[in-house]
Amino acid sequence: MGNIIWITGAGSGIGKALALAYNKDNNTIILSGRKESQLNEVAAILKSSYVLPLDVTDELIIQNAVKQVDSKFGKVDILINNAGVSQRALVSETNNEVGRQLMEVNFFGSIHLTKAVLPLMQKSNAGSIVAMSSAAGKFGFPLRSYYAASKHALHGWYEALGLELKDTNIHVMIVCPGRIKTNISKNALIGNGEVHAEMDPGQESGISVEKCASAILRGIRNKKHEIYIGGSEVLMIYFKRYAPWLFRFIAKRVSAK
């Protein structure tokens, strides 16, 4: 029997690419997301899969889903928290409820699922937990205030979890993608909660989801704690850390699109 790999946000983009990348070695991919039709389309391509629709903002649904997985498989070898939603709106134009929604999906949805799956990994003293952050999880950027805040929060929580698990065989990794060619900007929320429905030029020219998925698999295999994926925009992470003045100089001049 291969690994049991649970991927949220698996119907498209990076999540779908990850499912296809793991489609080998007798692995079984648990595909989760809100759009069951998309999940079924991905499942039709895979050798072994299990479609499990999931709203990560609903704790009861999460608990029931984990019970279902435990009953059917008895374990989760790799959990990839990929579900997420971005933002394209000024702070002054973003409703508080929209901000809460971003936090519920990107932060609480991720950590609630991780907490629910953790006992399965602790039972076998093995597993990998992946948190999908963003380059915006390392620095703030215009039009992404709540998105950046939700991703910053992931770092604090998952770093703490990783240190708490230091004497176990459970591996925790945070992924910080930059511009990957997905529909994340199209699906981003504007200030009133409606969908942005536009492809950012920077996103359009980003690296492929296949290349991103390959880097994530490599990071999991090598038990990395944090990885950065993208093009030249990833340099902004290092500028923020080592030369904050340079980061601010560039950030003020780079298009937020």
Image: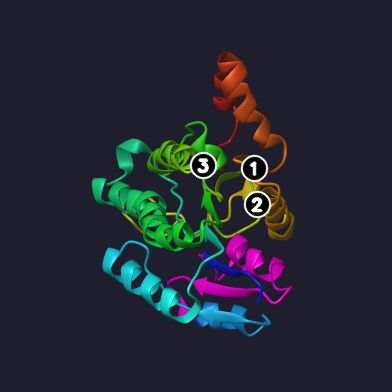
Label placed on residue 220 = 2
Lateral position of residue 23 relative to residue 122, left or right? right
Mark 3, Cα crowd under 10 Å, few <14 / some 14-19 / many 20+, is few
Magenta span covers which residues?
8-36
Q: Which quarter of the figure is the C terminus placed in?
A: top right
Residue at image position (33%, 56%) is: 193
User: Which is more foreground, mark 3 or mark 2?
Assistant: 3
Q: Which amino acid, mark 2?
A: Ile
For the residue pair 44 and 61, the one nearer the viewer reads as: 61
For the residue pair 51 and 79, the one nearer the viewer reads as: 79
Cβ atoms under marks 1 and 3 closer than 8 Å = no
Question: What residue is pinned by disc 1?
Answer: 224
Question: What residue is pinned by disc 3?
Answer: 167
- Magenta stretch containing residue 16, yes or no? yes
Q: CA distance from mark 1 to mark 2?
A: 6 Å
The image position of residue 40, as x and y in percent, is 55, 83
Label placed on residue 74 = none
Q: CA distance from mark 1 to mark 3?
A: 16 Å
Quarter assignment of residue 226: top right
User: Which is more foreground, mark 1 or mark 3?
Assistant: 3
Q: Which quarter of the figure is the N terminus placed in?
A: bottom right
> In the rendered structure, which disc, 1 or 3, sits on the residue that comes first in sequence?
3
Q: Which amino acid, mark 3?
A: Asp
| Element carrying mark 3 | loop
Cβ atoms under marks 1 and 2 closer than 8 Å = yes
